[in-house]
């Protein structure tokens, strides 16, 4: 069975990390599959939203710690720090694609999200978690400093002080607390997780896709903290979205007092 399963429905791509026996811990085949799928989906005009989730009762446990324990050099697998860093940085492109692609990305979290698994969820635009799901940065407890962009994303979500607490202590919090802190957008009944995720994804898949991608770019640019750059980016993207067929349809629908029907063009 493949370590990553890809399905599509109603303009939504669903990527399921599929190692339930290992709480969907990352494997090289899984990472390779994600690195192939994400750029392809980013360029796929038939897709308006990308959901990433985990098989079974976990989202993703992060790196395979059991594998680290049995390998020479632990997580570096016998490589020098420089060699290991180069390989790891390539794998971390998974998070960059989830954050930067023009599609809206949603992490659907049925259970444990830990370490790099949490980092991948944090890279997404939205996170919906099942109540009771355990969430932790985990790294401090296995003697590692963190990867897959978690420090970048978490600091922007909750601020420096809380991010330091969550990383340096690596305590486990439940989805309900994660929602209160802003780590996840919603904590829902586990039985409703799939339906809630798909309902949100369908809103984006049926929306003004070009404009959504431009809006996402504006918001990502704002993360850099440069006001003038944000102004320039907003002006350019606003002007680009004004040329789309979806904008013309929305303006017409407004005059006709009806809901617009977007085509993603």
Image (spheres, rainbow, N blue to C red):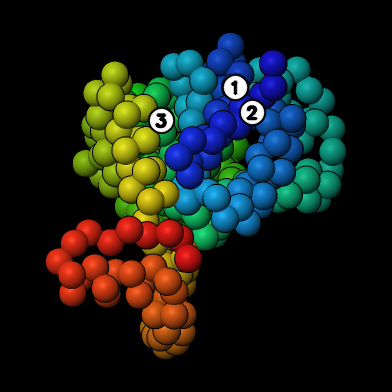
Q: Which residue appears farthest toward the top when viewing the image?
A: 21
- Label 3, label 1: how far apart the Cα atoms are: 13 Å
Residue 187 percent location from the top left of the image: 26, 33
Q: Residue furthest front?
A: 256
Comparing 28 with 181, the one in front is 28
> Is 209 placed left or right of 193 in the picture?
right
Disc 1 versus disc 2: distance between alpha carbons?
Answer: 5 Å
User: Viewer-nearest of labels 2 and 3?
Assistant: 2
Residue 144 placement (x, y as % from top left): 60, 37
Q: Which mark is residue 109?
A: 3
* Sequence order check, earlier mark of 3 and 1: 1
Up-down: is 95 above or below 249?
Answer: above
Looking at the image, which is closer to me, 19 or 257? Answer: 257
Q: Which residue is mark 2?
A: 4
Contact? badges 2 and 3 (CB < 8 Å): no
Marks 1 and 2 in Cβ contact (< 8 Å):
yes
- The tally of labels here is 3
Give the CA distance from mark 2 to mark 3.
16 Å
Read off the residue under disc 1: 18
Which type of secondary structure does the marked residue at label 3 adopt? Answer: strand
- Can you tell which quarter of the image residue 3 is in? top right
Q: Residue at x 38, y 51 (%)?
A: 206
Which element carries disc 2, helix, strand or loop?
strand
For label 2, the crowd category at 10 Å Cα-Cα, with few meaning under 14, some 14 to 19 and many 20 or more, is many
Which residue is depicted at the point 53% across and 40% down? 13
Q: What numbered label is drawn on residue 171?
A: none
Earlier in the chain: of badge 1 and badge 2, it is 2
Residue 154 visible: no
**Neighbourhood count class around disc 1 (C-alpha, 10 Å): few under 14, some 14–19, many 20 upward:** many
Q: Is residue 196 left or right of residue 167?
A: left
Q: Residue 197 placed where, x, y %?
A: 35, 35
Q: Identify the residue at horizontal 28%, vertical 24% (top origin).
A: 192
């Amino acid at each position: 069975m493949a370590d990553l399963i890809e399905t599509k429905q109603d303009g939504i791509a669903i990527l399921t990390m599929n190692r339930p026996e290992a709480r969907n811990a990352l494997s090289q085949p899984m990472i390779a599959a994600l690195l192939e799928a994400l750029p392809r989906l980013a360029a796929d005009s038939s897709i308006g939203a990308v959901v990433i989730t985990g098989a079974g009762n976990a989202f993703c446990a992060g790196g395979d710690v059991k594998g680290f324990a049995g390998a020479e050099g632990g997580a570096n697998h016998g490589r020098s720090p420089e060699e290991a860093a180069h390989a790891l940085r390539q794998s971390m492109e998974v998070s960059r694609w989830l954050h930067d692609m023009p599609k809206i990305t949603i992490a659907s979290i049925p259970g444990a999200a830990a370490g790099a698994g949490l980092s991948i969820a944090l890279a997404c635009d939205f996170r919906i978690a099942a109540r009771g799901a355990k969430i932790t940065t985990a790294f401090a407890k296995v003697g590692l400093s963190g990867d897959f962009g978690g420090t970048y994303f978490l600091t922007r979500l909750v601020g420096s002080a809380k991010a330091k607490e969550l990383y340096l202590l690596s305590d486990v919090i439940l989805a309900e607390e994660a929602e209160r802190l802003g780590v996840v957008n919603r904590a829902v009944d586990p039985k409703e997780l799939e339906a809630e995720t798909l309902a949100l994804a369908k809103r984006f898949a049926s929306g003004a896709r070009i404009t959504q991608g431009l809006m996402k770019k504006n918001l990502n640019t704002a993360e850099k903290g440069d006001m003038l750059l944000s102004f320039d980016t907003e002006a350019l993207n606003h002007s680009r979205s004004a040329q789309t067929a979806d904008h013309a349809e929305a303006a017409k629908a407004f005059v006709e007092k009806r809901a617009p029907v977007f085509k993603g063009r």
